Amino acid sequence: MNRIRFLIVLAGVLCCSGTVGAQEKKPFTPEDLWRFKGVSEPQLSPDGKWATFVVSVTDREENKKDSDIWVVSSRGGEPRQLTTSPKGDTSPRWSPDGKTIAFVSAREEDDQIWLLPFEGGEAKKLTDFPGGVSEIHWTPDGTSLIFVGRVYHECEDIECTRERDEEKKENKVKAMVHDHLLYRHWSTYEDGKADHLFIISADGGAPRDLTPDLKFDALTYWLASAGREYDISPDGQYVYFAGNQDEDQAVSYNTEVYRIHSGGGEIEKLTHNPAADNQPRLSPDGKRLAYRATRRPGYESDRYELMVMDLTTRETESLTGNVDLSVGALFWAPDGKAIYFEAEDRGDANLFAISAEGGEVRTVIGGDGPTGRGYHFDCQLSRDGSFFIYSFRDMPHLYEIYRCDRNGQKVSAITRVNQELYDTYHFPDAEEIWFEGDGGTKVHGFLVKPFDFDADKKYPMMVRIHGGPQQMFGYAFRYEYAIFSGAGYVVFFCNPRGSTGYGQEFCDQIRGDWSGRCFRDLKAGVRYVLDRYPYVDAKRVGAWGGSFGGFMVNWIEGHNEDNMFAALVSHAGDADQWSAYGSTEELWFPEWDMLGTPWDNPGLYDELSPIRYAKNFRTPMLITHGELDYRVPITGGEQMFTALQRLGVPSKMIRFPDEDHWIMKPQNREFWYRSILNWFDQWLKADTE
């Protein structure tokens, strides 16, 4: 299922100028989605004077997106576009002397490294790697770059990989032979390659494989990843990386931290934890290693603790063992005296700090301070330690880049890329609510009012259910909140049992209980809203969820005895847990959440299969699914649709042959949102308009 944490869209709290009254603005519609520009990947220059970032724009007619690299003063001002390729430029990285920007571009087919002089001049192509590269990073002396490239591990050189790729392309037999798990992942099948770390001179030449002996990916990418999973020692002698080298890739959630000399040699394993260790970060003096670690093997959503290892003695301690926060992206203060880390916290994502020797954790960015409520990510501290830049979104605004001083004060926006949209369209805020969930546990939720709200009117309500289940919906922009508010709906969303950001015990309570406390928490939230907000029409409530949220909607379909929901939309939801286990890829997830394999625990797999309650199906349902979704294969949607049709329940299925777990292509996305809105309009508005 989809355990998305950070795959969330963020926004700026001060972007809306307020010069146009809300009543004069236009409602936001699915046809307006393409107008938004994405702001991402901020990178502070070594001298702290500049910030590069990526702006993504949508060409609606061509049905594609393009991204380019921009630069702006770290104090704000008029940004300047640095690249103009129609094929996409991403991943800007400053050289240590600040004179060159390395970036990844597909302007000549595959993603390759290009170098751009900051003071002016043409970009120069550095790599010509078969299949492209990713995860680029300069060495501390600026003479070389590290990157990730995919190779056949049995090949002795890059040309061997290139030749094998050409042979496969020309071969008329397209059969794939698999003899182990994981043989597919997310939306692609295993192709015999593995991600290796390479080093290349900034002057050009042949890349050198730093990890030639690895059979599996040097860096392991999971939803719980918190950014680049490797680092380089300050003296440039060693590369530290985190990956999973276990043979049983499908059932092992066990990453370890390794190091390799930048000149080559044997790979050394530094950690020996049967759970997960990742995101290594070297102290400024190179003597200590910070990284994240969990304690329970096989549990992707276990609490990540901040660990520090003395690289001389190999003694390791947890700095946050008694802190009920799960550590995300982390970095050292320039003087090595503190470590900063991002973490979800009660509907927000904030930046925290702790002394490198341990002690009290304090909030630096976020919380009740001037930086505001919302999601604060990509946090970076200037080399002199005087200020931060970070990406930020709140409820009414998409990502922008912000600046504050080292204490989280003197906040200012340094980009306002989507300001014209905020001046033109209505983007709603949300009311924060807390209610009693199952057993009296406090549950956090949010309520969005419709466009042109009138307290004397009655409105339909859309209940949005998040994925995961170990995920969090926070005080942060999502397109559907604006679309449904603009269409005259109240929107309610909450974080029931299993959600992240509310302590590990709260998160753990979903295990083996997908249909219990979480379901009752959701219904308690809806009842709370209906009892206290008279403008919500209790007869016109719909629910929409994706991934685990899709499962929950499928579950509601068979357990809607009180007719709380009048219409349902399920995206990428499981229907039968036996077939879901046999067709998904990361098996540690169901084996943890379902307390074992189907043959070990058949009763629970049966009990938590929505299709087994088909005799109770009667609520109109729209099903959407991507055919390339290997996390939650489309058979789940097909099983639900077949049962609904055979039972005569009003239903419709939309399949996207060219999409995976998420619907991302611009025109597909517009059609998807419009179809969902039309479905709810059909069943929640038909008798009132």
Image (spheres, grey):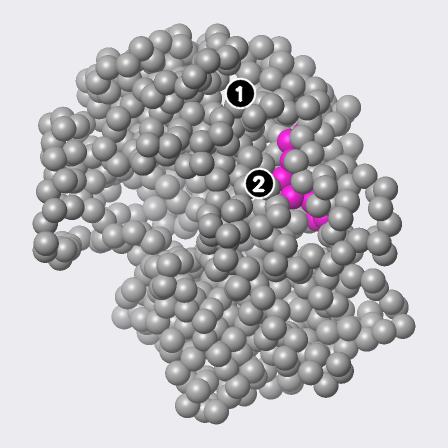
Q: Label 1 to label 2, Cα distance in Å?
A: 28 Å
Relative height, residue 237 to residue 457 (above, below): above
Q: Residues within 10 Å of mark 2 (few under 14, many from 20)?
A: some
Residue that appears at 14% across and 55% down: 174
Q: Is residue 139 magenta?
A: no
The image quarter containing residue 160 is top left
Residue that appears at 23% across and 33% down: 130
| Front-lying residue, 322 or 75 | 75
Relative height, residue 319 to residue 50 (above, below): below
Rendered image: mark on residue 257: none
Image coords of residue 583 (percent x, y): 29, 64
State the residue position of label 1.
332
Give the amino acid at mark 2: Gly
Image coords of residue 15 (percent x, y): 74, 38
Give the amino acid at mark 1: Trp
Q: Is residue 399 magenta?
A: yes
Q: Is residue 24 visible to the viewer in this orientation of the structure?
A: yes
Relative height, residue 266 to residue 511 (above, below): above
| Front-lying residue, 335 or 405 | 405
The image quarter containing residue 267 is top left
Image coords of residue 141 (percent x, y): 40, 8
Prevailing secondary structure class for the magenta stretch in the rendered image: strand
Q: Quadrant of the N terminus?
A: bottom left
What element does badge 1 sit on?
strand
Rendered image: mark on residue 38: 2
- Residue extent of the magenta highlight: 395-402
